[in-house]
């Protein structure tokens, strides 16, 4: 079992993916399998789960206050960060009604996990693209994530354990809505890092992946080498 695989997460995916694939007029064809390997410190990975995207940031690319997560997750090599609606992310999805209220505005949260394996080994499935950080991009990305977090007395506010083993939910200053989604936040993070020129109009995961330059390579399928 991968580091970021749980029965609860798989149950959520089973509800979300069929519905959202219909909304988005079908899922894309499958890219080739990811080639196993560590992330270079001048890159980040963007992982798409079809409806939601996450950032995978090498520990060596963390700057400023974000370096504190090396203490939170000792021995980590990659920091996974994803944004979402707090109640939706932290509560189990039990039916279609939970999905229908998901887009309504609400408080946000960051789900953060420290990995000891590359992201293509940590997840059971998904697609991944690599983005190359320009000079200063690592610092701007770290600053953007830190500004998103609700920080009290110099420390991000924890609001509960994440749904992956060892992961943590953190409170955010940024709220969620149907027009500012998990993927909108990822787009803003990539714009701050200089990986996409603009995040304007991003709502869906496919829009995030389409904006990323192929300079870091095309998309690849996680789990395809197993």
Image: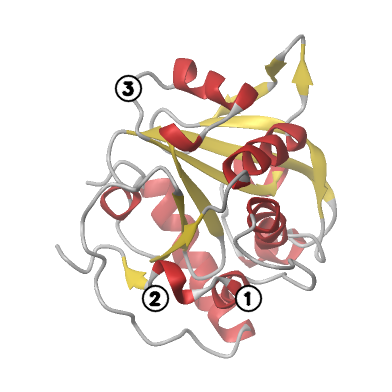
Residue at 43% over, 47% down: 8
Where 165 sits versus 7, above or below?
Answer: above
Residue furthest to the front in view is: 135
Tell me how far mark 1 sits from mark 3, CA to CA: 33 Å
Quadrant in the picture for residue 130:
bottom left
Graded by Cα atoms within 10 Å as few (under 14), some (14 to 19) or many (20 or more), the crowding at tag 1 reads some
Q: Which residue is mark 1?
A: 207
Of labels 1 and 3, earlier in sequence is: 3
Residue placed most toward the observer, 144 or 14: 144
The percent coordinates of residue 224 (x first, y second) are 22, 69
Q: Is residue 201 left or right of residue 195?
A: right
Q: Is residue 76 left or right of residue 38?
A: right
Residue furthest to the bottom in view is: 25
The percent coordinates of residue 192 (x first, y second) are 70, 51
Residue placed most toward the observer, 95 or 147: 147
The percent coordinates of residue 12 (x first, y second) are 49, 57
Tell me how far mark 1 sits from mark 2, CA to CA: 15 Å
Where 86 sits versus 37, above or below?
Answer: above
Residue at 56% over, 55% down: 94
Q: Which residue is mark 2?
A: 218
Graded by Cα atoms within 10 Å as few (under 14), some (14 to 19) or many (20 or more), the crowding at tag 2 reads some
Residue at 72% over, 31% down: 171
């Amino acid at each position: 079992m991968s580091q970021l695989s749980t029965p609860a997460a798989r149950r959520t995916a089973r509800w979300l993916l069929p519905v959202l694939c219909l909304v988005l007029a079908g899922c894309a064809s499958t890219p080739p399998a990811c080639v196993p390997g560590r992330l270079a410190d001048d890159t980040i990975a963007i992982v798409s789960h079809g409806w939601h995207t996450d950032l995978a940031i090498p520990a060596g690319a963390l700057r400023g206050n974000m370096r504190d997560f090396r203490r939170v997750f000792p021995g980590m090599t990659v920091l996974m960060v994803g944004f979402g609606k707090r109640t939706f992310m932290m509560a189990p999805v039990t039916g279609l009604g939970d999905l229908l209220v998901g887009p309504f505005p609400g408080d946000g949260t960051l789900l953060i996990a420290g990995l000891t394996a590359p992201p293509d080994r940590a997840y059971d499935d998904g697609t991944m693209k690599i983005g190359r950080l320009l000079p200063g991009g690592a610092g701007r990305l770290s600053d953007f994530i830190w500004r998103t977090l609700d920080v009290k007395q110099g420390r991000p506010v924890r609001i509960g354990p994440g749904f992956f083993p060892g992961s943590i939910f953190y409170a955010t200053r940024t709220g969620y809505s149907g027009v500012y989604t998990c993927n909108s936040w990822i787009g803003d993070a990539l714009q701050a890092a200089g990986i996409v020129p603009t995040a304007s109009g991003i709502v869906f995961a496919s829009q995030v992946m389409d904006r990323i330059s192929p300079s870091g390579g095309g998309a690849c399928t996680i789990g395809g080498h197993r």
